[in-house]
Image (cartoon, grey):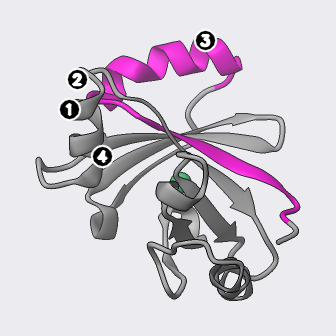
Amino acid sequence: MKPTHIEHLGIATPNLEAAMPFFEFLTGGKCYNIEVVEDQKVKTAFFKVGEVKIELLEPTCPESTIAKFIEKNGGRGGLHHIAFNVEDTAAALAEAEAAGLTLIDKAPRKGAENLMIGFLHPKSTCGVLTEICQQPR
Ligand code: ZN
């Protein structure tokens, strides 16, 4: 797998509105996109640090995996995943599977900002939930 760069860091938060001022302070910029991703039951807010984005994730319902993650983290949330940008998500997922890694997504699906994404299971990625993503064409 040859990622071009880290696309974003996914950070879970119980309250997007409450978290945004800190990330505006930290990044020295405004949130440039807020988007609900129905598929993942999250509301996202994006910030930029150079080429790398920060993706804040707030659960939209208690069944959201983000809600469960926050619960496990004492209600505060925290660093949830790291996303690597590749040329071709489908090819990268196939390569990861061939290397013996456990996939959460066997095939790419559409994520926030129209990225084609797929997740690798943390049990085979040193405990770090890993997202593979490809820019929209
Ligand atoms: Zn992500």
Q: Look at the image and give the residue range highlighted in magenta.
A: 3-29
Local crowd size for mark 4, using a 10 Å CA cut-off: few (<14), some (14–19), many (≥20):
many
**Numbered mark located on residue 75 in the image:** 2
Q: Do callouts 4 and 1 mark residues in contact (Cβ within 8 Å)?
A: no
Q: Earlier in the sequence, mark 4 or mark 1?
A: 4
The kind of secondary structure element at disc 3 is helix
Which amino acid type is marked by label 2? Gly
Answer with left or right where residue 116 lies relative to residue 49.
left
* Pointer 2 residue Cβ closer than 8 Å to ligand 1: no
Secondary structure type for disc 1: helix
The span from disc 3 to disc 1 (Cα, nearest Å) is 26 Å
Which mark is on residue 71? 1
Q: Is residue 120 magenta?
A: no
Q: Secondary structure at mark 2?
A: loop
Where is mark 3, residue-wise?
Answer: 25
Front position in the image: 60 or 91? 91
Q: Residue at x 66, y 68 (%)?
A: 133
Indicate the amino acid at tag 3: Phe
Q: Quadrant of the C terminus?
A: bottom right
Q: Position of residue 64 (x, y in %)?
A: 21, 54
Give the residue at x 50% y 54%.
122
Q: Is residue 109 above or below residue 29?
A: below
Q: Residue at x 75, y 63 (%)?
A: 85
Q: Is residue 57 left or right of residue 9?
A: left
Q: Amino acid at mark 4?
A: Ile
Q: Earlier in the sequence, mark 2 or mark 4?
A: 4
